[in-house]
Image (cartoon, grey):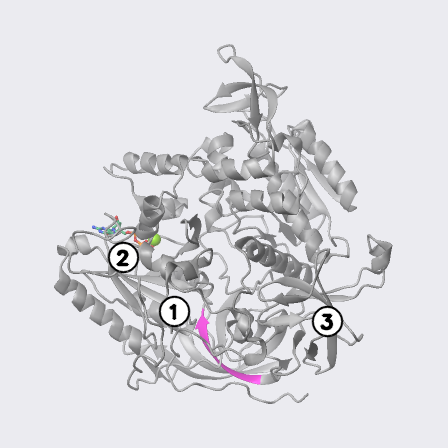
Amino acid sequence: MATNTLTSTRGTLLRLATAGSVDDGKSTLVGRLLHDTKSVLSDQLAAVERVSRDRGLTAADLALLTDGLRAEREQGITIDVAYRYFATANRSFVLADCPGHVQYTRNTVTGSSTADVVVLLVDARKGVLEQTRRHLAVTALLRVPHVVVAVNKIDLVDFSEAVYDRVEAEVQAVARELGVVDAIAIPVSALDGDNVAVRSARTPWYSGPSLLELLEALPPSDDPANESFRLPVQLVIRPQGAARDEQHRDYRGYAGQVASGVVRVGDEVVALPSGRRTTVVGIDLGERTLDEAFAPQSVTLRLADEIDISRGDVIAAAVDAPEPTQDITAVLCWLGDVPLRPGQRLLLKHGSRTVQTAVRSLDGALDLDDLHTAPSEALSLNDIGLVTLRLASPVPVENYATSRRGGSFLLIDAHDGRTVAAGMVGATLPTGAPAPTRPEGDEAWEI
Amino acid sequence: MTTTTNVTTPTASPLASTGSAPSSLAAGDSDDRRLSHLDALEAEAILVIREMAGELERPALLFSGGKDSVVMLHLATKAFWPAPIPFPVLHVDTGHNFPEVLAYRDETVDRLGLRLVVASVQDYIDDGRLRERADGTRNPLQTMPLLDAINDHRFDGVFGGGRRDEEKARAKERIVSLRDEFGQWDPKNQRPELWNLFNPRHRPGEHVRVFPISNWTEVDIWRYIDREDIPLAPLYYAHEREVFQRDGMWLAVGPVSRPRDDEQTSTRLVRYRTVGDMSCTGAVESPARTNAEIVVEVAASTMTERGATRADDRISEAAMEDRKKEGYF
Ligand SMILES: Nc1nc2c(ncn2[C@@H]2O[C@H](COP(=O)(O)OP(=O)(O)OP(=O)(O)O)[C@@H](O)[C@H]2O)c(=O)[nH]1
Ligand SMILES: [Mg+2]
């Protein structure tokens, strides 16, 4: 497979999320990355310098660039995700700086669920901690396409190669057990900037790229346009008498975002769960008419036949439409304050459809200490577990491994509306069996 | 179609390796079908607007006539085209608005055939429910009329044009963000927001704020205005105006922003980067008269838009967070 060069990533967007235990340096790293790429505007920097001075610090605390809440600044920790945007000449980035504290794991799951790359920080003095394992497990489960391990605070271990090697080996072992076989490690000092934007002379034994060089070269995520066509219908657009233009009185279109694949005028499609077939006769994006639409465009489809389709249905390619089902197995990241128990009833939101569901069984929970799956009576806040669900009506779910969009769902508490779990259809948990080695045909790296 | 097929096919490897999922052959020829950054932002915003229109009973869209709300409104017209926008727009009028922005607001409402709801800060001051602040700014005074309007009209969701790049508290905001029965935001206990599945469910009395352009930066906004040729209020473009300098900002000479004795007035070529309450919104010196010139200017700017133009954010380090916690936009 071709090596990845900068030209292949030009103009693409990379979404990055940080992970790792509390105080391992995530916010400092994000601040350093923004600072060293000249992405911090003068008034923002001045504000951070002012606050740092008021606290008696001699240098600007760059973590304050993302730790913007009062409570975060009081406690010196990150509580919720901060989103920051920057661009280099080559690429644009969305940085999601996530919290490390176990209490705020749901926010870290939030930040990583849309990430193309997770940068997992590990304090070189401390190595792998429980939150390191939890975040790695979440990253693996969410199938975040790339994982970078930043072995941070290398300045506090005298830039020691031996310490770095030991910590890297420890992280990689955990990563492999969780199925992450291609994590890339870098020794960094977020505080001083070593190997962040530019390579450091203080780590002469390290010959790899700086974090920024690596991020600029990471291949873009798999293009969902290469999967099969699916469009969850969000709205049926029928202006009737309200049409702003008389010619659209009889307009009837199905509005939604192309979740995956490509659809062209003339394509045969099927509405799910009804299974009725028809043909696409028109594709609209606002006033513009398109010949084809692809993920992730938000469009409106016009169809040849007036079949019954409403919000929540999925329009799919007729050739390989998923089979709607009422029974699924899935892995959950439980994010609710009240534990999940078998028999419980909840709402499940998949695409634009929300249905009732009952938890048939809890088939095990991940033990973060030894990374195997153990029987469990309940899933508590931040637990990861395997469940079997029964749905009140059929939903065309897909396997999360083949389609992030088609295989992801929310569980919602019907009483107060809270989102209590992130669900991944068909995912499995480690059994404690030997970890797989690097798969064949994986992309080679050259920077 | 039958209902019991189990589509789950557990894979052999634990948690499965990260990396490429096998792609279907049905559409395998699409190597260069990548949306531009701007198109991807547009698609995300339309997704959010439609999803909330589908989930909520009575949403409204905050429309001030400012550039961000104009872009949001433009995205809403695309989301429902060729049907009209199926909800009203809401403006919290501080009574200190630029007259050209109010004129622009009314024109736009007419052009798009929208229903406009106005909540007036002046009414609250006139009947004593609110008192003018010593510093004269009315931005923080908007919260009460806003929350009352949400209550009176039983809005269960309000679209706002807030962007995460504007300010550090806004950088923490969810796209769909819960407000309790007092309209308060609790930044320490936000609902998880996973993938692009949005959940606005809430208990009676609560509501959600929805920010479809969360991920847009100021320069994205201008590139989009330029590309889509969206008309804006004229004060966004360079024009001559009588101004005076205060706290490093150029304030317009007007009924609510009068120069003090030691403040010199002069006529300068300026434009506005943000449009808010006249008493605390500053202009920037600029020769940019077209969208394309503004894109260049904004991309090269060394100050954030609020840093350059908003006195109300200078009240304290956490001014925006404090206002947002109380229910501000
Ligand atoms: N010496 C040294 N100190 C560092 C480095 N990176 C971070 N720190 C310090 O470690 C402390 C924690 O840094 P943060 O960036 O706030 O850590 P965090 O991972 O964001 O913490 P949470 O978000 O609360 O989980 C701060 O005092 C930093 O200055 C580093 O590379 N070297
Ligand atoms: Mg942090």
| Label 2 beta carbon less than 8 Å to ligand 1 | yes
Write down the region rendered in magenta.
A327-334
The secondary structure type at the circle numbered 2 is loop
Q: Are marks 2 and 3 in contact (CB under 8 Å)?
A: no
Q: Is residue A333 magenta?
A: yes
Q: Please identify, in this view, whether the residue under mark 1 or under mark 2 is nearer the observer.
A: 1
Q: Which residue is mark 1?
A: A139
Magenta stretch prevailing secondary structure? strand
**Image vertical order of residue A162 relative to residue A66, above or below:** below
Q: Is residue A274 left or right of residue B321?
A: right
Residue A24: image tag: 2
Residue type pointed to by label 3: Ser
Tag 3 and tag 1, C-beta contact below 8 Å: no
The lab-note entry on whether marks 1 and 2 share a chain reads yes
- Report if the beta carbon of the residue with label 3 is closer than 8 angstroms to ligand 1: no
Amino acid type for the residue under numbered disc 1: Thr
Residues at marks 1 and 2, CA–CA distance in whole angstroms: 17 Å
Crowd tier of the residue under label 3, counting other residues whose Cα lies within 10 Å: few below 14, some 14–19, many 20 or above: some
Residue B155 in view, yes or no: no
- The x, y position of residue A242, in whole percent, is 83, 55
Left or right? Give the position of B102 relative to A437. right
Q: Chain of mark 3?
A: A
What residue is shown at x 36% (from left), y 79% (from top)? A441
